[in-house]
Image (cartoon, helix red, strand yellow):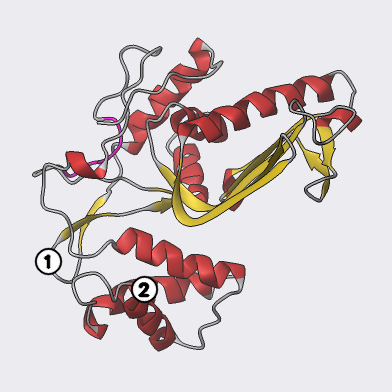
Amino acid sequence: MKEKTKPSAFSAGDLELGKQALKVMKSWQWVRIDPDNQPYSSAMMFHTALNRLAFDGVEYPSAALLVLCATGQIEARGDFQWTKLHGGEMFKLDGIGTAIEPMRWQELQKQAIRRQELLEEGNLKSATIDLPKIGYSQRPLADWEPKFDSMSYVRFSGGDEWSHPNYFEEIFSAENLAIFPLALPDGECGIVGIADEAQEDDSDPQPIMDATSQLGRRPKYDWPAATLAVFGRIHRGDFKPENQADIERALIDHLAEENGGPSESTVRPYAKLIWTESQKA
């Protein structure tokens, strides 16, 4: 099990909202059977979860998703970019289909609170900041857009010299965000990889299960990660398939190193889903 993650500055009302949302999400179908007759956990894009939570009666679903991510009760993966200048050194990192750790969501929530406070004070200028050394201007302190499967935050501490130890600029952004259940316990038909029960103790939420804690048989291929990766390439414009067959080949190439790679007939149902969704844009 992962180390438990304490919530950051969430009120009792926020945590209760997260508890209600988690209970609703547990009622959704997350386990499916792939063409190899293997169970797998089905990922869900943030915009879909947002709309379903609202449809199922959860008030403020955007806030509920943020609570669940920041307290480690669900795992979100996405394509992220991170840049930081600190102590005169520049650091950069990015990833595709990568787990976004709770600390990132906690920082998003902290900056969102600060931005709201500044807006309420009428201090519109301070609600956005410049990051001159790493090349950004007028960035909002926080931008939480689950309906667009994206989030970002910035941090800045000025000074007389950018090389001063206390001077830093930082920006973190993620897109193509999706919820990824991880474990497949035998006989489990509801949500998996997400805390097994709605939290009784709001101050100490249970973490999600990681891949090493699986009780059931793992699927032969990581279909959720593969479909998100290929769909992410289409969404960014890096991959422009002309037909479903192009997507089938992309999935096969992506999974080629896993157990020898799947057959065309195996990837076809997933390719069809990606092709259908990509044509809606």
Q: Position of residue 278 (x, y in %)?
A: 51, 72
* Residue 183 quadrant: top left
Tell me the kind of residue under disc 2. His
Q: Position of residue 57 (x, y in %)?
A: 46, 32
According to the image, label 1 marks what residue?
37
The C terminus lies in quadrant: bottom right
Q: Is residue 192 magenta?
A: yes
Tell me the kind of residue under disc 1. Asn
According to the image, label 2 marks what residue?
254
Q: Position of residue 205 (x, y in %)?
A: 35, 20
Marks 1 and 2: which is nearer the front? 2
Q: Is residue 123 left or right of residue 262?
A: right
- The one nearer the camera, 56 or 85, is 85
Residue drawn at (35%, 33%), measured in percent from left and top? 24
User: SS at mark 2?
Assistant: helix
Q: Position of residue 56 (x, y in %)?
A: 42, 37
- The one nearer the camera, 258 or 220, is 258
* For residue 196, above or below residue 131: above
* For residue 174, above or below residue 256: above
Residue drawn at (50%, 30%), measured in percent from left and top? 64
In magenta, the rendered stretch is: 188-195
- The one nearer the camera, 47 or 184, is 184
The N terminus lies in quadrant: top left
Rounded to the nearest angstrom, the CA distance separating label 1 from label 2 is 21 Å
User: SS at mark 1?
Assistant: loop
Contact, CB < 8 Å: mark 1 with mark 2?
A: no
